[in-house]
Image: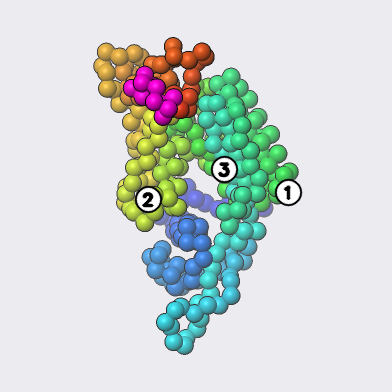
Amino acid sequence: MSSPRRTPQEAPGSLEALRERNRNRVVATLRSAGSISRADLARQTGLSRSTVSTVVADLVREGLVREAGETRTPGSAGGRPATPLSLSPSGGAVLAVDLAPTRLAMALFDLGHQELATFDGPFDADAMGLDGTVDALAHGLDRLLAEAEVPRDRIIGAAMAIPAPIAEETRCVGQESVIRTIVGTTLEERASQRLGVAMRLENDANLSALAEMTWGAAEGHRDAVYVELSRGIGAGLIIDGRLHRGASGTAGEIGHVPVDLAGAMCRCGNRGCLELVAGADAIAALVADRFDTQPGIAQVIARAEAGEPMCRRA
């Protein structure tokens, strides 16, 4: 068995780390561009044409990149026509997971961004606990693989969004997590072992910020802030084109900025955090007596839009 490829984190400054960074840069550009020539790939990545050619040759050989028919650039006269490159849809599959306190969504996509299989349903993460959550993820993946008829070994990447910061060095879930039963755990490692795929955990607001930079409102910009308003309040920060997490992964945790020093105790240990004042649960609690049962934020918003004064005020 060949030795596993070293990552840049394992061997910083090594030739192998440089190759991996170049490879990741090319793949990321292909992912966002869709279809692109070698020359344009070199310009957008800042890599030399020879480096791009070497990386592309490896990716084509591995079946991750495909070459389309030759095309000529508008206005060009003569010369060798460009050959568009794109990620090969059949080159593999990626798994996306969104774990929230009351719901679980999972989906498989091919490398051409086409949805292969998905499900989204209610889920009580705190009631299930860590073991139950990991088991649910494993069963969910089995279901997706069967529906999409994709072998497990074709999954080349997996990411899970969670409402919590993750410490970069230890990969532990931070205490600011909205889901109490995963605080302080290495959910990433547990999930990877149980599912048989390398899972990467990331804060949900951070992933939303990356999505907006890649395909959404912040596309083409180098700096952006994505603010997520839910039970918790968080932000994904993009600075000079890179995700900014902070030393402990809490750079965007604006929900835990104290705004009322005499306020109630927060789950993070502070008093009067923004989340306790402006989070979805806090807003719903202000008008709970106007409903027959405990309302969710969606019901409060619906009544506010219908003109109900207290809900509008809340």
The alpha-carbon separation of the residues under discs 3 and 2 comes to 21 Å
Q: Amino acid at mark 2?
A: Ala
Which SS class for mark 1? loop
Q: Residues within 10 Å of mark 3 (few under 14, many from 20)?
A: some
Q: Is residue 253 above or below residue 20?
A: above
**Residue 273 image point, x, y percent:** 32, 22
**Whole-percent x, y for residue 51 in the image:** 46, 69
Q: Which secondary structure, mark 2?
A: loop
| Between marks 1 and 2 in the image, the one whose residue lies nearer the viewer | 2
Mark 3: amino acid: Ala
**Residue 218, label in figure:** 2
| Residue type of the residue flagged with mark 1 | Glu
Q: Which residue has dot 1 on it?
A: 149
Query: Chief secondary structure of the magenta span?
Result: helix
Q: Earlier in the sequence, mark 3 or mark 1?
A: 3
For the C terminus, give its image quadrant.
top left
In the rendered view, tell whether residue 185 sits above or below residue 249: above
Disc 3 designates what residue? 96
Name the residue rendered at 52%, 26% in the picture.
Answer: 101
Q: Quadrant of residue 49?
A: bottom left
Q: Secondary structure at mark 3?
A: strand
Instruction: Judge whether residue 86 is colored magenta.
Output: no
* Residue 313 covered by magenta stretch: yes
Q: Kindly indicate the quadrant of the structure image that contains residue 175.
A: top left
Front label number (3 vs 2): 2
| Residue sitting at x 56%, y 61% | 87
Q: Where are the magenta residues, as a range?
A: 303-314
Mark closer to the chain start, 1 or 2:
1
Label 1 environment density (alpha carbons within 10 Å; few <14, some 14–19, many ≥20): few
